Image (spheres, rainbow, N blue to C red):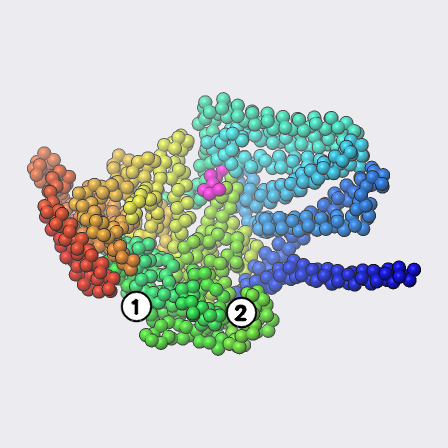
Amino acid sequence: MNFDYNRKTIDINKLKRWKKIGNKIAITFGILFFLLVVGWPALQWATEYIWMDSLGFGNVYVTILQSKILLGVIGFILFSFTTYIMLFWIRHAYIRHFEPKQLPPVILNRKISNLIMVAVAIFLGFVGSMIIQGIGWEPALKLLNYATFGKTDPYFNMDISFYMFILPFLQFILYVLLGLSIFFLLLEIGAYSVFHMYKKSRTAQLHMGITLGVIGLLLAGIHVLAPYGTLLTDQVNIFQKSVVHGLSFTDKLINIPKAYLLAAVALIGAIWMIVSLYSGKLEAMLLPIIAYVGLVILGQGASVVVQNFVVSPNEFTREKPFLEQNLKFTRAAYNLDKIQEKEHPGNESLTGEMVERNNLTIDNVRLNDSRPLLDIYNQIQTFRTYYRFNDMDIDRYKINGNYEQVFIGARELSTDDLPAQAKTWVNKNLRYTHGYGVAMSHVNKVTSQGQPEYMMKNIPSEGEFDITRPQIYFGEEPYPNVIVNSKVDEFDYPTGGDNATHRFEAKSGIPLKGLNKLLFAIDSGSFRMLVSDQLTTDSQLLKTRNIMDRVKKIAPFFEYDEDPYIVIRDDGTLVWIMDAYVKAENYPYAEPYERNESYIRNSVKAVVDAYTGEVTFYVADPDDPLLQTYANIFPELLTYEIPEDIKDHFRYPEKLFKTQAKMYGTYHMSNLEVFYNREDYWQFPTEKYFDKDIEMEPYYITMKLPEYDEEEFVLMLPYTPKKRQNMISWIGVRNDGEHYGEMFVYRFPKQKNIYGPQQIENRINQDSVISQQLNLWAQGGSEVIRGNLLAIPIEDTVLYVEPVYIESSNETSLPEVKQVIMAYGDHIVMEETFEKSLDKILEVINPGKKTEDKTESDKPDTEEKEDTGKDKPSQPLLDADELLQEIGDKFTAYREALANGNWEKAGKIMEDIEAILEDTKK
């Protein structure tokens, strides 16, 4: 007996010991779970708030976080509470229906079953919380703070704000609740299918009946809102689309009445099913389901019949009033109703006097192209492997009193390109902290070697501007976080065999002292930050230095253009300007430009100081109701007073312009019948770039509009008719001063042929002299790059210009502008410089003006042939093989000179090649 007693004592002691171990493990896992679920998000929230507050946007972060927490709590309570009630009801039904011996212990044991139900409820509560707060925070804030548009739809007479802010939130709530209810119903069907409880248990029947009633009520709500949705789509049934975007004839006749009828059937059917279920008439439950599904099918069928047999035979007449609203509201959604249309005669009137009158336009014709130019900058103006130009941007400046277009690029630092042995923690975090300066060149001037003519260059920066803060701490590179004002001097720029150093002079970083140091060391996972003796009480952390990431973290509700550009301010500091878009779905009657988005404005310009990282969101369009809504939500986010030296460099963004231009290609048609047939559809032309035909992109030019006396910065794009290549019109937008954002279109006479870009490209290819020279260069081992073809409107005429680059096959070679092709009317010339091409064009067209008083029959045939050049027979090229061999040898010598850095010798060899090619013309 004593043996058994001792054994029991030992077993009890072991159990107690294991229980203690289990408790410790449980506590440990509980602490880890708490740190993971609560601690880590809290750390993230704290560090993000400290960072945002250091930039002056702490209230923006708090507003978003509060809305997410509030909605998260609501979602958690809703999902967890309803889940627990559902599980509790199922357990209760089981206990009432079955004998205790028929049930497993886990159901009978109230404590264990409660723990399981609570755990499941908490899990689904977290799921619901993530859904509600993740998707709903922005719609909820818009709903509570929206501004009205002051414009109503013609059918329901609802303000556009209803469709943009109220309707989406209501639909979101209804669909979330419907999804949750259907999920519960499926679980209940599974639970109550055991021994056919749904037939025998009143408790189960009542439970399922209530769930069905909720589903019916939610379906009814969705159908009540469905008529408003007819104004937002062109889908009239699951098979067909209407010619109208928005309310159509079929929607008005069939779909709207059908929606209300389905709402009534869903509501009545839900009541019917509850009564049938509770009274035990299970077969009767099928009747409302059959009626509902049958009505859905009948409604779709009726829609198909009406669309095919009522609308299609006389579509224009049936849809005419709806087409008018589609046209009107789409134009308003994209600001197309404010575009001024003007006539352009498309004359061939170019003269030397006209060139003189428009010398600023001529002097700013862009010869360099941004893509080849980027390669040149990265080879000539980086000086060290760790510097990089990410992009070349086009802008305009007043230089010596002259208004001039320029190319400008920022020389940024990339620590990824440091030598492997230099990639230490100190170097990457304390020493190599910033890029240095900018490079700038004329858009229309090149050196004798075909390289850009610089206006700002080298390190330290030298040129037309005095840059007071050339250091670039914030830019387009994927910069890591760095610490400034440490004991380590920051690398500034190389100076021969030594390096200049710099100390960060601003106070815009996060001070690394006290709790901040601990929080950000944990946040960045950097133990070195916590223990390094290189840090001082003056040290600051520069966090989120990539400008795109920076603005997205501050204001994630805007969409940002992918092409930021750097600007030199009047005080010599550098800032980045980024275009921010406000976008929305659900503009009634408006055709979407992308997915379901039918409203876009560039209402905000985000400006980031390249040195301090300070961010300012300037309001570019204060009248935009969507922006006013964001201003109501975040009153401290936006700045309305814009400094002149910032405003002077605002550019109308290409993305918005291209979107508007594309929509205008269809919606410029004011005649409803023409609009219905798409008879006058305009499209973007194509051009040859390198060796491929691509869609032409918008481009900035400096030009003088016919109604104005001064040149200005204009973004423009030609149009061609559908499936034709002649230029039918061109669209532009002004960028300067109080006229910023004013759009206009110049139409060419339909009875006159104005060559389009692709027609000019084809004529260049067909020109025997030009194509022969381009082929000779290509056969000599070099790559011939055809740059962007630019259509330049000058008063009442249009001039085409295309640069030609030549690049050696050597890896270190640089693309060089070696020829300029110019086309005007029926004439095409190619010369070494823009000036020579322009002189040649004027020379070619001038004889025609001298003999303009002669009739066509008075002109000798030979003179006509000389003037036009069309019928002049091409002369065979003598000794072609020897000539090609000679050119090939000279190109080989040319590439060797380039590879050796002997620019002077390379230039002389290229002049010899050009002289040989010039001789072939004679």
Which residue is depicted at the point 53% across and 69% down?
Answer: 510
The residue positioned 40% from the left and 75% from the top of the image is 501
**Disc 1 target residue:** 463
Give x and y (percent) for residue 279: 79, 29
Residue under pointer 2: 510
Residue 190 falls left or right of residue 424: right
Circle 2 — which element?
strand
Q: Secondary structure at mark 1?
A: strand
Does residue 569 show up? no
Residue type indicated by callout 2:
Ile
Q: Which residue is situated farthest in the right direction here?
A: 1
What residue type is disc 1 on? Gly
Q: Residue at x 52, y 56 (%)?
A: 555
User: Where 14 falls versus 842 (above or below)?
Assistant: below
**Residue 530's spot in the image, x, y percent?**
56, 72
Q: Quadrant of residue 434?
A: bottom left
Circles 1, 2 touching at the beta carbon (< 8 Å): no
| Residue positioned 29% across, 46% down in the render | 691
Residue 139: mark in rendering: none
Asked if residue 855 is among those painted magenta in the image, a careful observer would answer: no
Of badges 1 and 2, the one in the foreground is 2
Q: 421 or 806: which is nearer to us?
A: 421
Q: Which residues are magenta?
A: 589-595
Sooner in the amino-acid sequence: mark 1 or mark 2: 1
Please identify the quadrant where the N terminus is shown.
bottom right
Q: CA distance from mark 1 to mark 2?
A: 35 Å
